Image (spheres, grey):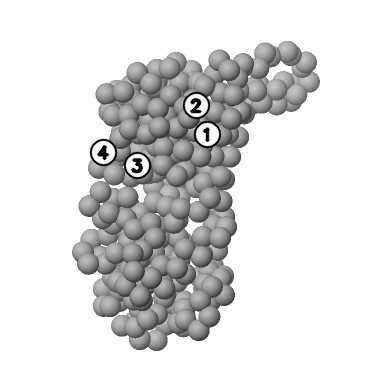
Amino acid sequence: MVLLVDTGISGWMSNEEIAAQLRAQLPGADILTPEGLGDPAQVTMLAVANLRADWPARLPNLALVQKLGAGVETIVAHPALPPHVRVTRLKPDDPAREIAEWFLAYVLRAHRNLDAHRANQARATWVDIEPKYTPDTVVGVLGLGHIGGRTARMFRDIGFQVRGWSRSARDIDGVDCRHGAAALPEMLGECDHVCAILPSTAETNGLFDAELLGAMKPGSQLLNAGRGTLIDEAALLAALDAGRPGHAVLDVVSTEPLPKGNPLWSHPGVTLTPHISGWHLGDAMKDVAENFRRLGAGEALLHEVDRQRGY
């Protein structure tokens, strides 16, 4: 058995850094990077952030693709990945906490009028602006899985009113949980901030179209750290011009990196961050190592994905 590490992205942890962490977890195991790969037929497990187009064809004995993160839509939809190849993802707490912090940072930026205070400082003007009152402010969280549930509980613990939405029923203490497509437009109309952390599926792709954006509360803020395919970006730009929502904070977009000249760069109602809301994996390499061991032992895998459902 050989575990091959190839993140498939730049600007993050290197292949060798990840391989070194895994070697510490699995002494004596064959853990390679593409630079040291000999016979591709030896590879049974591939650890990736993005699955390169050519790997499925080059690895004839591949049995498992381990995502070094949560979103697996590009892996399960990979046209060359044979149906027998299993897919697993990670559910570490560190990036979940970091994504929740990202949502909190941009909600508080608006909640405490930080942009207005910065602008007034630049003009050397002393202007009192009343902060919003936390118990009267409604934060919606779309997607109540590992990351969304943590986000909802964080806002709840600070004192915001929290609405949660998911496709199927969930129960989180102190959170007004709703589910099903019919419940979403009404909930959006109640929220001052909407935090989206939904996976990319056939049901969520383009979910925020002109109609659903029009259901949002005027002047509200839409924050997306899930998948860029969630939002119809042309519809979003038109909706922002109409003030519903009033602002969008996007950590993910439909094409990454965002092409130069894309109107999202310059629209005054858009704040962009370059897919950095969840960065550190923490102790998640323990789960990668454990899946390598379980694969060899024929045991149930951690966080296995249903390839038909896409998550």
Position of residue 136 relative to residue 17, above or below, is above
Instruction: State the CA–CA distance, disc 4 to disc 3.
Output: 11 Å
Q: Is residue 58 visible?
A: no
Rendered location of residue 286, percent (x, y) = 51, 65
- For the point 23% across and 61% down, the residue is 79
Discs 4/3, front: 4
Instruction: State the CA–CA distance, disc 3 to disc 2.
Output: 30 Å
Q: Which mark is residue 174?
A: 2
- For the point 55% across and 30% down, the residue is 155
**Mark 1 vs 2: CB contact within 8 A:** yes
Discs 1/3, front: 1
Q: Badge 2: how crowded within 10 Å, few (<14), some, or many (20+)?
A: few
The amino acid sitting under disc 1 is: Arg
Instruction: State the CA–CA distance, disc 4 to disc 1.
Output: 25 Å
The amino acid sitting under disc 3 is: Thr
Residue that badge 3 annotates:
229
Residue that badge 4 annotates:
203
Q: Which mark is residue 153?
A: 1
Instruction: State the CA–CA distance, disc 4 to disc 2.
Output: 27 Å
Give the mark nearest the N terminus, 1 or 3.
1
The amino acid sitting under disc 2 is: Gly
Q: Which mark is residue 38?
A: none
Query: In front here: 140 or 208?
Result: 140
Q: Secondary structure at mark 4?
A: loop
Q: Is residue 32 visible?
A: yes
Position of residue 24 relative to residue 176, above or below, is below
